[in-house]
């Protein structure tokens, strides 16, 4: 179909389903036929992070492509579920549509005024989850999420019932308290206790970031990108001057690092 002829979302979704069914058919692609829901997990995770990267880079063209790649995994999982006579992609679409309506009474219910929507958006979402049978306010956060993301989501959920600070400074004080406890255990040679306290330090720092309205995971990736770019610049500086990086002392490398670090663009 020509790009100039715009088809509907429904048409293209059905077309994608047809293509996937053909790939999974007896005369289809050998690789696609042998895949299982579990075997595709690493690729699903990879595609998700490629979407995240496109979003963070504000790269609209890449985002268009990566969303398509991610959608392929959704359709593929739906096809395999249908083959196993578990459920269909239609069932998943129906489920999310019903869930969105149920969890947004401030939009689809009687009180859909601007003030009503503003006041009830978050509370309605969490209350509806509880009504759906979840036993804890913390339920629904996958355990295999990256640690920083999971920590922030858990803290956000606890905040829904008021288990939270209203300001940043008390959270910062808690962070310093956790660092002091880490130092005590490390100096005492209690390695296992120090490991536990180190986790508390990270968790407390995520809480500080959340109250500062920073996303911990993307902020960490930004810090990693910055270090990566600066270290590569350090390597290049040593190479240009025919210096031996492996023979350099930390003090020598640190002097070069301080000289070049502000010249490196790490936001590419």
Image (spheres, grey):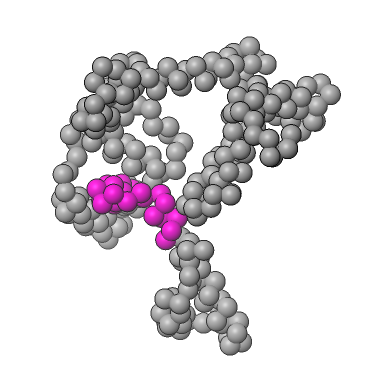
User: Is residue 120 visible to the viewer in this orientation of the structure?
Assistant: no
Quadrant including the N terminus = top right
| Percent position of residue 256, x then y | 46, 82
Residue at 20%, 30% (x, y): give it. Answer: 115
- Please give left or right for residue 72 compared with residue 230 in the image: right
Q: Which residues are magenta?
A: 199-223
The image quarter containing residue 24 is: top right
User: Is residue 146 visible to the viewer in this orientation of the structure?
Assistant: yes
Residue at 58%, 88% (x, y): give it. Answer: 241
Which residue in the rendered view is the most extreme toward the top?
85
| Percent position of residue 90, x then y | 57, 17
- Is most of the magenta stretch helix, strand or loop? helix
- Please give left or right for residue 52 compared with residue 190 in the image: right
Which residue in the rendered view is the most extreme toward the right?
27
Residue at 42%, 76% (x, y): give it. Answer: 262
| Percent position of residue 167, x then y | 16, 48
The image quarter containing residue 165 is: top left
Nearest the camera: 256 or 1? Answer: 1
Q: Is 202 part of what is drawn in magenta?
A: yes
Nearest the camera: 110 or 235? Answer: 110
| Percent position of residue 237, x then y | 55, 81
Residue at 19%, 40% (x, y): give it. Answer: 164
Instruction: Note whether 249 is above or below 164 in the view shown.
Output: below
Instruction: Note whether 244 is above or below 5 in the view shown.
Output: below
């Amino acid at each position: 179909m020509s790009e100039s002829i715009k088809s509907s979302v429904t048409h293209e979704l059905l077309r994608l389903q047809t293509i996937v069914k053909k790939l999974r058919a007896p005369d289809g692609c050998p690789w696609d036929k042998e895949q299982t829901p579990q075997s595709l997990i690493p690729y699903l995770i990879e595609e998700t992070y490629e979407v995240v990267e496109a979003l963070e880079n504000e790269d609209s063209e890449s985002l268009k492509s990566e969303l398509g790649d991610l959608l392929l995994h959704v359709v593929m999982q739906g096809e395999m579920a249908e083959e196993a006579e578990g459920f269909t992609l239609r069932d998943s679409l129906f489920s999310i549509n019903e869930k969105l309506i149920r969890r947004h009474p401030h939009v689809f219910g009687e009180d859909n005024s601007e003030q009503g929507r503003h006041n009830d958006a978050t509370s309605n979402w969490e209350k509806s989850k509880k009504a759906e049978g979840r036993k804890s306010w913390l339920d629904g956060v996958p355990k295999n999420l990256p640690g920083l993301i999971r920590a922030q989501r858990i803290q956000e959920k606890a905040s829904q019932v008021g288990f939270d600070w209203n300001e940043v400074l008390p959270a910062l004080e808690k962070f310093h308290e956790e660092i002091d406890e880490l130092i005590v255990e490390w100096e005492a040679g209690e390695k296992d206790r120090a490991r536990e306290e180190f986790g508390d330090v990270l968790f407390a720092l995520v809480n500080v970031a959340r109250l500062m309205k920073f996303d911990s995971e993307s902020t960490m990736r930004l810090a990693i990108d910055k270090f990566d770019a600066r270290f590569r610049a350090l390597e290049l500086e040593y190479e240009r001057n025919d210096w031996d990086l492996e023979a350099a002392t930390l003090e020598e490398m640190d002097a070069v690092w301080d000289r070049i670090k502000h010249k490196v663009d790490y936001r590419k």
